[in-house]
Amino acid sequence: MNIIETQNLTKIYGNFTAVSKLNLHIRKGSVYGFLGPNGAGKSTTMKMFLGLTNPTAGNFHIDGKTYPANRVSILKEIGSFIESPAFYGNLTGEENLDIIRKILGLHKSCVDEALQLVGLTEFRKRLAKKYSLGMKQRLGLAGALIGKPPILILDEPTNGLDPVGIHEIRTLIRSLPQRYDCTVLVSSHLLSEVELMADDIGILNHGRLLFEGTLDDLKKSAQAAGFPTDNLEDTFLAMIDEDNHKRGSAI
Amino acid sequence: MSLVIESKKLKRTGYLAAFLAGGFLAAAFPVVYMMVKADEVTMLSGNPIDILMSANWQIMAMLNILVSICGACMMYYAEYADNGIQKMSVLPIRQGNMFLGKFTIAALVLSAMVVIETAVLVGCGEYWFSNYRFDLAEVLKIAGFQIFVTLPTVMLMLVIASACRNMWVSLGIGVILVFTLSILPQDNAVLSLFPFASPYQMLPAAIESGRTVLFLVVCGIETALFGVAEVIYLKVQRCFE
Ligand SMILES: Nc1ncnc2c1ncn2[C@@H]1O[C@H](COP(=O)(O)OP(=O)(O)OP(=O)(O)O)[C@@H](O)[C@H]1O
Ligand SMILES: [Mg+2]
């Protein structure tokens, strides 16, 4: 069963098409890796899911609900983290999470739990604007994870983390569907990273979906298309490269 | 609910300090004025409160407006500085409620200032005017009227601040509006109804010219209109981001 589905989802800025006729299928209880180079349209797609920007055309369903009619009830189910962390610099990490907790109507203990989960307990009394980049990133993650929402949308969650942090967060994301019975949509630039976390993969380039399926499907279709398959990163680069060539000749 | 959350967000922003500083200045002004000019002023005939207001209210109203401008800028600076507002817009709340919470706080702060100011005017009346008789109903009417005619300014300033990511832009717009509308003639019936101009209107003068109801109705409509404009802006904004 798909918990998120899009039909020809399109976003056009002026005369620039950022996302073009996207048809995504995200299975309930899976980790979906959303992959693509800079400017591919990953963040734009996620922003449409969260109602931060309106689609130009097409539509999407999240858990059977549609935007914009069910905006608030869609948002009730999603924990999210988009691009750079968004917080109140004049408040401490703990106060930031407490505001989110109050809005979501959760129990007080959820704040400590979330801080624990991302390893910020020690720094909870420090002002968020005095946090290091990685700590801000962790605060953003805590804000997404608080209250164990059934759907998580995470945009490059490991950005700016140290190697230990990257490993921790990857392991955490990998374990989420079993632990909390949730679905995760996570974006990244690195296939090698997505490979470690995701069940399904969607590859995006210049706003178009090049591939969608499991890792095995990817290997099979790459073999069939004559791409290198011994190293998945090379497969990814070759796919993007070929798509760019096609686009180049089309223009 | 949203009132509690909105007031928590103002922690350490200097909002309270700005309000206290503005309130203190506004309260000090008539006292200083009377200390210097008591002899001349107490000679005038008429209701002491009316005399005190016509001598001091211009400055006090301007301070109220300036505090409202600073307050609106601070409120939205806290939202935009580290993009907290983006986190808010992906949480299951209506953006309009958040704005309403901010407006309520701003209106309460304004009310507190006006109450302090009228209290100081009463104090000056008691201290310097031998013919002054304290009348609670009169004082409350004055405070209520002055709060009400300042509300459109408070609302409009919040709308401006919410639309500008850069605090300096909203501050600049606010200051320009203050000066433009304070230069324009005060006695013009139409101009005096504009936000940033209406706060200078005083209840005694309004009663005299029979415009009390006009002011209350127009300011009420303006406040509601700016509020509706914000709600529409919040909806339309999503198409352009
Ligand atoms: N508000 C906007 N106005 C105009 N163009 C925009 C806007 N937001 C994004 N874009 C453009 O849309 C395209 C896709 O941007 P998006 O942020 O979705 O990419 P991304 O896949 O998240 O890239 P990255 O990996 O660098 O984060 C980019 O070319 C970007 O310049
Ligand atoms: Mg991005």
Image (cartoon, coloured by chain):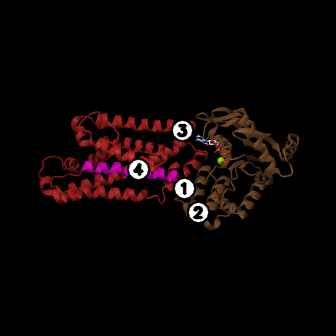
**A74 shown above or below A128:** above
Chain of the residue under label 3: B
The colour applied to the residues of chain A in this rendering is brown
Instruction: Name which of mark 3 and mark 4 comes first in the sequence.
Output: 4
* Image coordinates for residue B143, horizontal then vertical, percent: 31, 47
Tell me the quarter of the picture where residue A245 sits. Answer: top right
Three-letter code for the amino acid on which mark 4 is drawn: Leu
Residues marked 1 and 2 touching at CB (< 8 Å):
no
Badge 1 is on which residue? Answer: A88
Magenta span dominant secondary structure: helix
Foreground: disc 2 or disc 4: 2
* Real-space Cα separation, disc 1 to disc 4, in angstroms: 23 Å
Disc 4: host chain: B
**Residue numbers of the magenta segment:** B56-81
Q: Label 4's element?
A: helix
Confirm or reject: label 4 Cβ below 8 Å from ligand 1.
no
Could you tell me the amino acid type at mark 1? Tyr
Which of the labelled discs sits on residue A159, or is there none? none
Q: For mark 2, what is the residue?
A: A131
Q: Is residue A89 left or right of residue A159?
A: left
Q: CA distance from mark 3 to mark 4?
A: 28 Å
Q: Nearer the viewer, residue B162 or B92?
A: B162
Numbered disc 1: secondary structure: loop
Q: Residue furthest bottom?
A: A122
Q: CA distance from mark 2 to mark 4?
A: 33 Å
Q: Is residue B168 above or below residue B211?
A: below
Q: Which mark is residue B237?
A: 3
Closer to the camera in the image, A195 or B6: A195
Compute the Cα span from label 1 to label 2.
Answer: 12 Å
